[in-house]
Amino acid sequence: MKYVDLHLHTTASDGVMTPSEIVRYAKSKGLQAIAITDHDTIEGLEEGLAEGEKIGFEVIPGIEISAEHSSGSMHLLGFFMDIHHPFLNERLGYLQKARAERNPRIVEKLNRLGIEVTYEEVVKASGGGQIGRPHVARVLLEKGYVRSFPEAFERFLKKGALAYVEKFRFTAKESIHFIEEAKGVAVLAHPNTLNMNGYSELESFLQQLVKEGLKGIEVYYPEHSALEVAQYKTLAERYGLLMTGGTDYHGIEKNGLDIGVGRGEMKLPYSIVEGLKAVRDKSL
Ligand SMILES: [Zn+2]
Ligand SMILES: [Zn+2]
């Protein structure tokens, strides 16, 4: 029996392996299929799909969208989207642009507080990688505006602090909509991070997502307890949803999880992929 892994990150977001590397690695591990699901981007898919084609290994185009959510965090997986679909690309482009404007706005807010930092200094502190609040914190520390990293967050950068700028996110409804428009199948990722206040709150939340077009729940996930898995299965059955799973592999050095197996407990059969394909084909 061969297994699949439908939740993986590459260097296109915060994973360690390039898309080609992860495809070759999955094949070498004896998996039957994988989905590449980078955070808020499909930039690794062209390469990943081409590599799959080249070496004869099934790669499913995927994505993991961070959607707006009042408590905890909500991630939505999309599978089988047409990666060249104009609406999908327009929406993801919009998201990127909104995120890129965030750091300059943080600097603007600091300037208005009389703190003399420039965006160029923040870029320099990032060393050329993705820019984020830790780099702003480093500049504040270097210039003596704070005495420590935590102080920079506490006084200026954490949610609700003086120079905080909200991260732009699409709503769940909007995210499901553009996944569906691009002929993809939308699935709620690791429901345990939603921080719901109990089972019945989760159920009514899920009912709303189903109305908005949700087709599945990621039931099998390394951080889910046996009880959570049982609960998510019950909910999936009750609302006729697909049950998917994946390891959320980012590179074993990142969190000790390996592709396909997690910490050794994951065994996801190919029938999960068949279920996704059946739902996709029905809505085509
Ligand atoms: Zn996630
Ligand atoms: Zn993930």
Image (spheres, grey):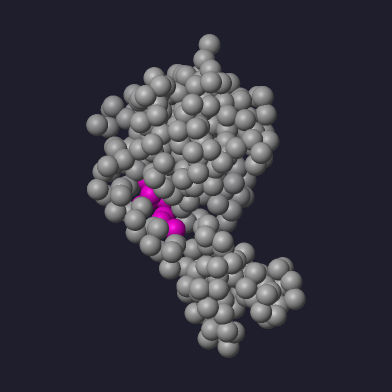
Quarter of image, res 232? top right
Tell me the residue at 62%/30% (across/down). 258
Quarter of image, res 259? top right
Residue 86, given in percent of the width and then of the height, sits at: 24, 48
Task: Report the residue that reaches farthest toward the bottom.
Answer: 114
Tell me the residue at 41%/55% (across/down). 171
Helix, strand or loop for the magenta stretch, by majority: helix
Residue 174 falls within the magenta-colored stretch: yes
Task: Report the residue that reaches farthest toward the top.
Answer: 1
Residue 148, given in percent of the width and then of the height, sits at: 74, 71
Give the answer, above or below, for where 46 lies relative to 93. Answer: above
Residue 11, given in percent of the width and then of the height, sits at: 50, 44
Task: Report the residue that reaches farthest toward the right.
Answer: 147
Give the answer, above or below, for where 128 lies relative to 88. Answer: below
Quarter of image, res 56? top left
Tell me the residue at 51%/49% (across/down). 74
Tell me the residue at 71%/68% (across/down). 149
Residue 97, given in percent of the width and then of the height, sits at: 38, 62
| Residue 187 in view here | no
Q: Give the magenta part as a residue range.
A: 169-176
Camera-side residue of 28 and 60: 28
Q: Quadrant of the C terminus?
A: top left
Give the answer, above or below, for where 44 lies relative to 110. Answer: above
